[in-house]
Amino acid sequence: MKLLVVEDHALVREGLVLTLRSLDRRADLLEASNAGDALALIEGERDLDLVLLDLLLPDVNGLLLLLTVRGRYPMLPVIVVSALEDPGTVRRAIQAGANGFVAKSSPSYVLLDAVRAVLAGGVFVPDCIDGEGGRREGSAPSTDAKDLDLTVGQRRVFNLLVQGLSNREIGQSLGLTEGTVKVHVSKILRSLGVTSRSQAVLVAARLGLKI
């Protein structure tokens, strides 16, 4: 397991690393104190499993860094760990493509739960923004994708989309042209009220969609 902690305050960063070490003492834990170093490490360490990202970095706004990482490495999971705990910040982080959000005021077990959930392919968003708890998204009551007014074909595309397949791979799997897949994906995004594939995956996890 290889994790990257991006945090400019040394004491906080060391505390995060110490907490993460309890997950697996053999884990390779990398550290960066700014966005520039973080991007260099991500570029050089292509086998990273997860990034833990602070939003208040000295050189670049953390949300901008998150958007950059999501654009260049769409399959790399990112958990935001921030002192900014208001619902608006959480919402912006998730909309920017974060796979999870943990408040710095949370107890260590919340961070560990979040890491386990995201490494398992899930999403972790706090129930309350007060440091007392969080939940694995997807534990909400399931909703049938038919409620979103998607056709059978679109639900099949959606199912492969949430598995991380590209438009080309979805087309090959379902015997569709890439253009047809793009049309289906556009309809799926509109139905969910989102603008990106990563947001669609997060919404599917949050709603516990049965596709």
Image: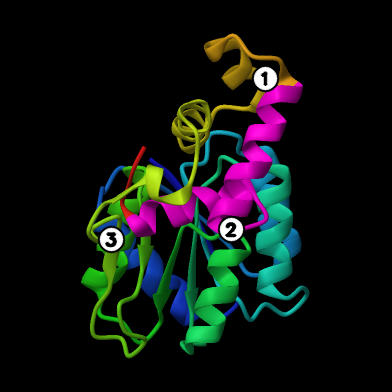
Q: How far apart are the alpha carbons under marks 2 and 3?
A: 16 Å
Find residue 121 and report its horizontal and vertical position in percent. 37, 43
Residue 122 in view, yes or no? yes
Viewer-nearest residue: 58 or 159: 159
Which residue is identified by label 1? 168
Question: Mark 1 is on which residue type?
Answer: Arg
Sooner in the amino-acid sequence: mark 3 or mark 1: 3
Q: Nearer the viewer, mark 3 or mark 1?
A: 1
User: Distance of mark 2 from mark 1, alpha carbons?
Assistant: 22 Å
Element at badge 3?
Answer: strand
Q: Tell me the element at label 2.
A: loop
Q: Earlier in the sequence, mark 2 or mark 3?
A: 2
- Tell me which residue sits at (25%, 52%) in the image: 142
- Quadrant assignment, res 46: top right
Instruction: Look at the numbered disc 1 and give the secondary structure of its residue.
Output: helix
Residue 53 left/right relative to 15: right
Q: Which residues are magenta?
A: 179-207
Quadrant where the image shows the C terminus: top left
- Nearer the observer: mark 2 or 1; the answer is 1
Cβ–Cβ under 8 Å for marks 2 and 3: no
Q: Quadrant of residue 57?
A: bottom right
Residue 157 magenta: no
Residue 193: x %, y % from top left: 59, 60
- Per the image, the residue denoted by label 3 is 136
Q: Is residue 12 above or below residue 193?
A: below
**Residue sitting at x 73%, y 67%:** 64
Q: Quadrant of the N terminus?
A: top left
Question: Magenta residues: mostly which secondary structure?
Answer: helix
Q: Residues within 10 Å of mark 1 (few under 14, many from 20)?
A: some
